[in-house]
Amino acid sequence: MQGFKAPVIVHEMGQWCVYPNFDEIKKYKGPLKAKNFEIFRDSLHEHGMLDQWRDFLRASGKLQALCYKEEIEAALRTPGISGIQLLDLHDFPGQGTALVGVLDPFWDSKGYITPAEFRRFFNATVPLARMEKRTWTTAEEFKAQVEVAHFGPAPLENAVGTWKLQTGTNIVAEGAFPAGTIALGHSNWLGEIDVPLSGLDVPAMLTLVVSLQTGSDQPENFENSWTIWVYPIYPPMPAPGVLYVTSTLDEKALARLQSGAG
């Protein structure tokens, strides 16, 4: 953004595609037909994987949501960016097949993300975290800098930010930031998080949750979250054994695989 003086808007961010939702075919009851979806469906059937299409939709949809979250948050953390525009919230069928939306062309959910989940990272007010990485070891301290991007109608007075690091429902650590005013714009600083990881039962997947409670007459709560992974610094290595090397999947190879041998 250095060197730009005019407003800069991110145009058609991401465009992350999702596998087709074949249940959508029956929604076309007029002169338009989803022939493109029928081609995808028939091709999947020919390759013997038609029974997996819902798994493909959900997996690619979850990945799409994560990719949009990463790009949107990166823009919200960047001073000087004046706005974000997606190609659309729903799929764009106007020039062929562009399955880039979290909704289908009928503005219906595809089932892998809810409106509330989407608003956690794409809203007028979004808690944000800056982390060096997402994978840590028990020899390190988890560190994060927390801020807020706020583009609501007015500053937020007496807003209180809180955070917690949890695995499942178990809270590993938690804390609160001093109350203050959240101004309009980027980079509203809340504070830092520093948590030693040496006492954790690892490997573990943890979730950092940051919440912002407004102090207005009609209080609102804005919340966002991120996943991190923690591993032992020196993971135990399996004892070396005798490897069976073969160029064919013979009975001996199958037997060793079934027994867990190499």
Image (cartoon, helix red, strand yellow):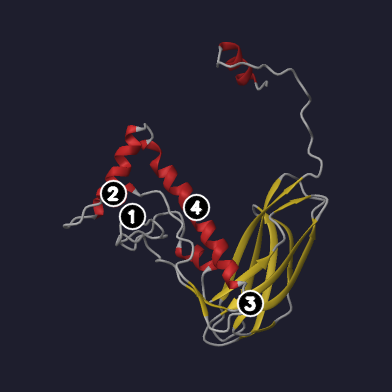
Q: The residue under label 4 is which amino acid type?
A: Lys
Residue highlighted by disc 3: 2
Whether 237 is drawn above or below 152: the answer is above
- Image x and y of residue 95, in percent: 30, 60
Q: Earlier in the sequence, mark 1 or mark 3?
A: 3
* SS class, disc 4: helix
Mark-to-mark CA distance, 4 and 2 = 23 Å
Mark-to-mark CA distance, 3 and 2 = 43 Å
Depth check, mark 1 against mark 3: the one in front is 3
Q: The residue under label 2 is which amino acid type?
A: Asn
Residue highlighted by disc 4: 62
Q: Earlier in the sequence, mark 4 or mark 1?
A: 4
The quarter of the image holding the N terminus is bottom right
Residue highlighted by disc 2: 36
Q: The residue under label 1 is which amino acid type?
A: Thr
* SS class, disc 2: helix
- Image x and y of residue 239, in percent: 79, 25
The quarter of the image holding the C terminus is top right
Q: Which residue of the protein is positioned furthest toward the front in this rendering?
A: 3
Depth check, mark 3 against mark 4: the one in front is 3
Q: Earlier in the sequence, mark 3 or mark 4?
A: 3
Q: Which mark is residue 97?
A: 1
Please give left or right for residue 88 compared with residue 237 in the image: left
Please give left or right for residue 42 compared with residue 246 in the image: left
Depth check, mark 3 against mark 2: the one in front is 3
